[in-house]
Image: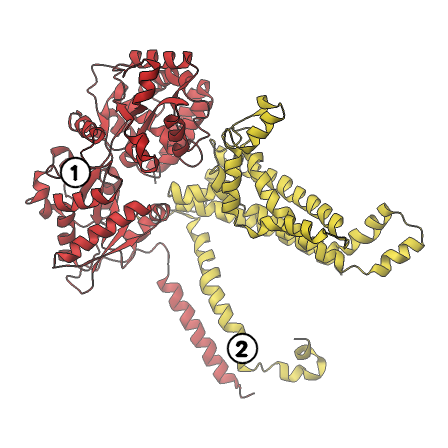
Amino acid sequence: MALLTAPARRRRATRVPPVVLAFLLIPLLAEAFWVFWPAIQGFYLSLTDWNGVAPAKFVGLGNFREMFGDSVFRTALLDTVLWLVLFGGLSVVLGLGAALLLQQERRGVGFYRAALFLPVVFSLVATALVWQAMYQPDGLIDKALGGLGLGSWAHPWLADQNTALYAVIVPALWREIGYVMVLYLAGLKGIDPALYEAARVDGANRRQLFRHITLPQLSSVNAVVVSVVIIDSLRSFDVVWALTRGGPYHSSELLSTYMYSTAFQSLRLGYGSALAVVIFILAFGVIVSYLVRAFREAD
Amino acid sequence: MIATPPSRRRFLAGAGAASAAALLSGCVTSTSSPSGKGASGGPVTLQSNLSSPQAKAAMQKLVDAFDRRGGAKASLNTVASETFRTQLPTYLTSANPPDVLTWYPGSVADSYAKQNLLLDVSDLWTSGDLATYSDAQKKLCTDSAGKKVFVPASYYWWGVFYRKSNFAKWGVGEPKTWDEFLDLCDKLKARKIAPIGLGAGNGTTWVASSWFDYLNIRVNGARYHRDLLAGKHRFDDPEVRRVFDRWSEALPYFDPNGTALAFQDATTALLQGRTGMMLIGTFFADAAPKDALDDIDFFRFPIIDPKVPPAEEGPTDGYFASARTRHKDEVKELMRYMATAEAQETYLKGSSGTAIPVNPKAEDSGTPLVKKGRALIENASDITQFFNRDSSDALQPSADTALTHFLSKPKDIGSILTTWQRDAQKIWNR
């Protein structure tokens, strides 16, 4: 690309060779057919009332109007925001912490890195099944509490509307921290050690090193991490669905689980599509605004 | 570098035409018209949701037996039950649908029949095995336009199950009426046993609907129950409120882990004697150890109002066929075969054996439990199917939400029923 746009070759660049054109157009067509076209249909469906069998009925913005009066939608939106803050925030903070702890090459550090990264390898549904067994009444967690003399804390964690959402966040976090850690480890490896040496010569302490060298140097990784974490939290579905299905009575409902149950259980595909559009706008809006800011700063 | 502008333009035009064609043909909500074509080659495809290993093998045996007898051939395609459930509308509306599908009769089949998606099999019912089926089954398999659209194969029953040895140990017997039932609960509670196991947690929330169904059938009758689920009454009516008043009387006796355990775990608790009894369908026996099964017995859900004739839940499973099938005659041949005593016995022998064949001439597995179950259903004044089968799968989540809410906050029942009605209205209005 750099060659093509170089001034000396500008004249030739206007005539794109057919191979290049094919390489561009064929993926574009595939993408258009399997991604953009279904997405556009999703937008269209969000303006209809459709049960999957009878012909769809056009209702304009009726589905979006319904959302304003829908208390479950409000719960799901709030839970999604809570999820974004808790799951997103904690996985960034803890992932960075783990990366800082494990960045130095010490003996056995590889083991800890692998141990923290291991949950990422497991499928989330398998993870959820393991945690479900632990959360069971008489499961590992209740037994451990009993062993510590905290038997009165034993609890149907997933069946209580006050604890269900937090009980679901923990396994999701358990997995995400390892992923974020690896991203940050890569970022930390890329920092020029000369910067630290120079700062130490200038008499900087550990906190100043972190604040004035590590953090600014990580800003490009931060952009990636934050995007990944936001996307992951907004599309979090599998772990919630496998553990609680958004229940008990919507207390751990996220927008994604609400969308799924509306579309594929209640078979209200129009309203479900409208929820999907809201999720899309949220994710897209948050990420674009973040990336624009991040890149502006970088320039 | 032989690229010339005209060729590129032609290429783009071609690409544009291709994508335009894709746009025109691929609208998701479009419904293609039925082909209505008569015989054409290939076996009849039977799409089955019976994906548990035992049931899948039993279905394969059934299809093999059909193929061996000559004439039309069938091929079995088993789909994971959850996928099947969510994809069923897609199967039926696709231009090239599976020919025969496993599913439920009653209002569920009727909702598809109303969209002209099901094959009319009325002629099968005029003679042969199907003509000998009970009137209740005939009614169940008829759609609202009066056409027969379903061929039933087997049914199972719900009851309050317990371990005989435990009841003997605790010195208690089967209750007949609601008061005797509450009395029994009291006795068990005094022995520090959770009297009633539930199993409405961890993805099997729908089990709680059995309590709603039975209480409603006993308090308001089967007809009211069906009308309510069809949207002819309201969930915030005083009749429904009475159901929950009764439920509240039994609520202190429910296992506190009732909404935390899946029904499989709740049955384990029952078999281990940690809970006293459990309202459940016979399918729970699939996962129970064989030696425990001989110790299992059940009693009919207690009578609350003697004036209300006792109906029972007897969910029926069977087959319907797509209206767009390309080989109607072969499909009917397969469905006629599925209705025979021979076919139903073949399937039951291969499966766990707690289901009962619909064909009156077919033999069941003959265990005392199954004999008692068959008598229960045959003597019932009316048969209901289950919450989702008497309404729709789409209404089930609204019940799950309302009932788990009630189980943990019974005092909120007023607002719970208002919400339930509002949620249900959205489904009925679809």
Q: Which chain is yellow?
A: A
The residue pinned by badge 2 equals: A21
Residue B345 in picture, x, y percent from top left: 17, 43
Q: Is residue B265 left or right of residue A82?
A: left
Residue in front for this viewpoint, B64 or B336: B64
- The residue nearer to you, when weighing B12 against A84, is A84
Examine the rendered structure and indicate whether residue A211 appears above or below residue B282.
below
Give residue B249's quadrant in the image. Answer: top left
Q: Residues within 10 Å of mark 1 (few under 14, many from 20)?
A: many
Quadrant where the C terminus of chain A is found in the figure? bottom right
Name the kind of residue labelled 1 in the image: Val
Q: Nearer the viewer, mark 1 or mark 2?
A: 1
**Is A117 in front, or is B309?**
A117
Q: Tell me which residue sits at (28%, 45%) in the image.
A: B55
Asked if residue A30 can be seen in this view, the reply is yes
- Residue type at the position of mark 2: Leu
Colour chain B is painted in: red
